[in-house]
Image (tube, rainbow, N blue to C red):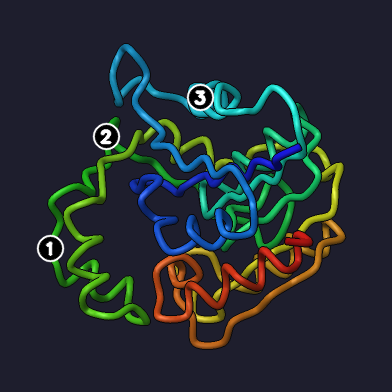
Amino acid sequence: MTATAILIHGAGGGGWEYAKWQPIFAAAGYHVVAEDLVPATNGLDHTTFADYVTQVQQWLPDEGPLVLVGASMGGILALTIAELARPAALVLVNSVPPAGVGPSRTAKRYPPIVRWANGPLEETRASLFDSDEATIQWAWPRWRDESGAVLQEIAAGLPVALPPCPTLVVLGERDTDITYQSGLALAGWAGADVHLYHGMSHVGPLLSRRAAEVARAVVAWCGG
């Protein structure tokens, strides 16, 4: 029976963030799902974390083994879905930690819509410092605005249960959005294996020059 790999993207991104991972999972025999999270029917400014959870639930296969992969915001989504779907394996990439795990976070207030679309190219170049120029130029126009309510829920901390399956935490040592120390705390809480990549950015596991290497290591860990 074909295994399914659901790849869940981070805030302000899309399924396109996994463009370097999808062919590697597919070559290992997985049916790959890397969809875009979309605003709720009443608009992005009214979209909540629960809306995203509902969307990911709709991507779940009817049968067969399941691997959940989540990056950044997608990581806390994957942890939430793991409580419901009982995957065979869980991969968390520079993931948002759940409530009570890692260093305490400062409370934040966000506007109803956080404007990330059409930002300066230099911001993408700075974020993707470990990517090649072609990837930077390709990613730049693809960022999207994000729901402030979702970001506020994440910043406040979302409670989840311990993963019910083998878990891998993938970390970029130069992640300035979610520090790798936070990721190590997440791994300790979850009893997870760790792949730590020195010199790698927040989005680096997915889009850096070494993204294919990271993806192959993840697939190997999953048993592919």
| Cβ atoms under marks 2 and 3 closer than 8 Å | no
Q: Amino acid at mark 2?
A: Ile
Label 2 – label 3 distance at C-alpha: 19 Å
Amino acid type at circle 3 is Gln
Q: Are marks 1 and 2 in contact (CB under 8 Å)?
A: no
The kind of residue on which mark 1 rests is Pro
Within the image, what quadrant is residue 223 found in?
bottom right
| Separation of marks 3 and 1 at Cα, in angstroms | 30 Å
Figure quadrant of the N terminus: top right
Q: Is residue 115 depicted above or below 101 in this figure? A: above
**Figure check: 29 above or below 198:** above
Q: Secondary structure at mark 3?
A: helix
- Where 126 falls versus 34 (above or below)? below
Element under disc 2: strand
The circle on residue 22 is none
Q: Which mark is residue 120?
A: 1
Report x, y in % for residue 123: 21, 68
Tell me the residue that label 2 is attached to: 113
Work out how far the residue at label 1 is from the one at label 2, CA to CA, in angstroms. 18 Å
Residue 55 has which mark?
Answer: 3
Q: Residue at x 28, y 19 (%)?
A: 43
Q: Residue at x 49, y 87 (%)?
A: 199
Q: Position of residue 157 (x, y in %)?
A: 62, 42
Residue 192 position within the rendered picture, expressed as x and y whole percent measured from the top left: 81, 62
Residue at 48% from the left image edge and 73% from the top image edge? 211
Query: Upstream in the sequence, badge 3 or badge 1?
Result: 3
Q: Where is residue 164, by image quadrant?
A: top right
The local crowd at label 3, few if under 14, some if 14 to 19, many if 20 or more residues have their Cα within 10 Å, is some
Q: Secondary structure at mark 1?
A: loop
